Image: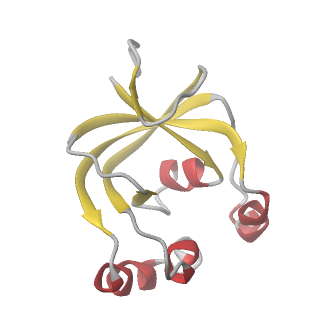
Amino acid sequence: MKVITIKQPYASLIAKGYKEYEFRTWKTNYRGDILIHAGKGVDKEALKRFENLNLDYPSGCIIAKAKITDCIYVDDDFKKKVVPKNPEVYRGIATKTDWEGYGFKLEDVEEVENVKVNGKLGLWNLEINIK
């Protein structure tokens, strides 16, 4: 199955339904099932912003599965539609005026029992049965 490694707290925000797009500088043509891997990297400033949510932030493990249903170029029109949905979650993308990239639309997100595994860059494959 395809996997994407995401820093915390963003991986947990996706798993809990607060974040519906994952942002990357590269485009993907892949559509379909994907596992969300919480990497060992942590954005400490962002953790402080979301401490009121009282979420757990596991690292180095698969924490959710989802579907990538679209890959959208992030332009001003996209930002105007997405940022108001959750300004705190999408604050980073709203303030980056010189950043170019893509938003991977994630749907049908389900948390899974944490499975320890090392992450990788890009979309990567993992042979595993997730329940």
x then y, percent, for residue 81? 32, 83
Residue 67 to residue 129: above or below:
below
Q: Residue at x 35, y 61 (%)?
A: 102
Q: How many marks?
A: 0
Q: Residue at x 76, y 64 (%)?
A: 51
x then y, percent, for residue 54? 73, 58
Residue 24 to residue 94: above or below:
above
Q: 110 or 73: which is nearer to us? A: 73
Q: In the image, 9: left or right of 89?
A: right
Q: Residue at x 40, y 27 (%)?
A: 124
- Mark yes or no: residue 57 visible: no
Q: In the image, 122: left or right of 81?
A: right
Q: 121 or 55: which is nearer to us? A: 121
x then y, percent, for residue 14? 49, 53
- Mark yes or no: residue 5 visible: yes
Q: Residue at x 33, y 78 (%)?
A: 75
Q: In the image, 6: left or right of 129?
A: right
Q: 117 or 29: which is nearer to us? A: 29
x then y, percent, for residue 35? 41, 33
For the C terminus, give its image quadrant. Answer: top left
Q: Quadrant of residue 104?
A: bottom left
